Amino acid sequence: MDLIYSLLSMLNEMSPYILLGFLIAGVMHSFIPQDTFSRHLSGTGWKSVVKAAAIGIPLPLCSCGVLPTAVAMRRNGASRASSTSFLIATPQTGVDSIAATWSLLGPAFAVIRPIAALVTALGGGIAVGRSEKVESNSPHEEFGSVESAVTNNRKSFVRKCVDALKYGYIDLVGSIGGWLMAGLIIAALITVYVPENFFSVLGSRPIFSMIAVLVIAVPMYVCATGSIPIALSLMMKGLSPGTALVLLMAGPAANFASFTLISREMGRKSAVIYLSSIIVGSIAFGLVIDYLLPPEWFNAGITNSLCKHDHGISLFSTICSAILVILLIFTFTKRYVHKQIKTGNMTKEYWIKGMNCPHCQAAVAKSIEEVNGVERVDVSLVSGKATVEGEHDAEDVIKAVRSAGFDVVE
């Protein structure tokens, strides 16, 4: 019972903020033209690095979801420096995770987290810009991005609102919902079964605890929102606030899949700088929190959570949690219950390379659906196969997939 109560309590604290964050994310996705990012991130100067970081911080993309976006930006003319800055800043934060951070960890964490993402992204992007040789980085073929922007602008206001709700509460929930629940379950297990002050020895030596967290966080994957309850539960067991920030930064931003893809697309040197900036930046900000800033700023989240546990669960939070759980069940069912498509003369199959999460799957499906003649699309994340029905040109489908940041195995 303690485990269930702890899980429900954290879910209730986060759910109103998460639902609000999903709504804002959907509005951003539907009303901001998709070619805006690539258009503003071309060039090798520091301005494009700043723009990339500023654009990436509010975007609700996880580390595997940001990879195809960054690859598409790079192929559409964005520099290595701005692409690296975007890759560092985006997965660490997002409107949904910032709101959830405020709800569980308090305003200090919610403010410092995007600031840390911005600084590390600027440092990594500028370092890549200085390391790469001056080259004529002419934009690649844009694979119909202008046409996509025109199509988006022709949509009515009502249609854009519907698309915003669909993206925020269906596509985005499907993208990070599994990781969010995993984070909540891990946090509940730590809260209930790990003894009090278990990490007090590490907490007295923050630098060693930060290195230990990095060793665990860098290889694994956890989304920006899913890492929040884990960080809170570890702080409640004696881990320092600065070490919690290291987890919040390094866990979502760095993993082996990201490093491998960046090495292939932008070179090993860019990948090493990308990883180093995350490690150095997270430790630097963690030490600032532990040694230079007032501890009460960051212990407010623990105090607030304990107070909420004592005062019970509010009706509004319970309703929000119920809505979030329903959305999670719906998207889970939609993901794993595949529709059967009859194969015929108008049906073709394509093998997609590079999909890692439901967000990638949705991005591929959406790009293919916009191809002339396509009537129905079924994209399998497990097999990597896209089944496309309708009288369409195969080359148009391949271009659409590549414009989304993926590739087709021919």
Image (tube, rainbow, N blue to C red):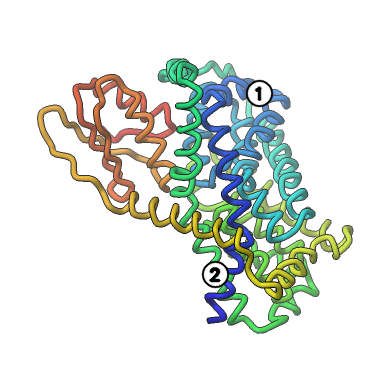
Which residue position is annotated with label 2? 186
Which residue is at 79% across, 64% downward? 300
User: Is 121 located above or below residue 326 in the figure?
Assistant: above
* Secondary-structure class at tag 1: loop
Which residue is at 53% across, 34% downward? 70
Quarter occupied by residue 8: bottom right
Which residue is at 54% across, 43% downward? 61
Total marks shown come to 2
- Depth check: 202 or 270 in front? 202
Kindly identify the amino acid type of the residue bearing the numbered disc 2.
Ile
Q: Is residue 329 left or right of residue 76?
A: left
Residue 45: image x %, image y %?
Answer: 70, 23
Residue 84: image x %, image y %?
Answer: 61, 36
Residue 333: image x %, image y %?
Answer: 34, 54
Q: Is residue 280 left or right of residue 391?
A: right
Residue 341: image x %, image y %?
Answer: 18, 40
* Secondary-structure class at tag 2: helix
Determine the residue located farthest toward the bottom in the rendered image: 195
- Residue 329 in view: yes
Q: Residues within 10 Å of mark 2 (few under 14, many from 20)?
A: some
- Depth check: 160 or 126 in front? 160
Mark 1 vs 2, N-terminal side: 1
Kindly identify the amino acid type of the residue bearing the numbered disc 1.
Thr
- Depth check: 111 or 90 in front? 111
Q: Which mark is residue 44?
A: 1
Determine the residue located farthest toward the left in the rendered image: 345
User: Is 343 located above or below residue 277 in the figure?
Assistant: above
- Residue 140 in view: no
User: Is 257 located above or below residue 209 in the figure?
Assistant: above
User: Is 292 located above or below residue 349 in the figure?
Assistant: below
Q: Is residue 352 left or right of residue 85?
A: left
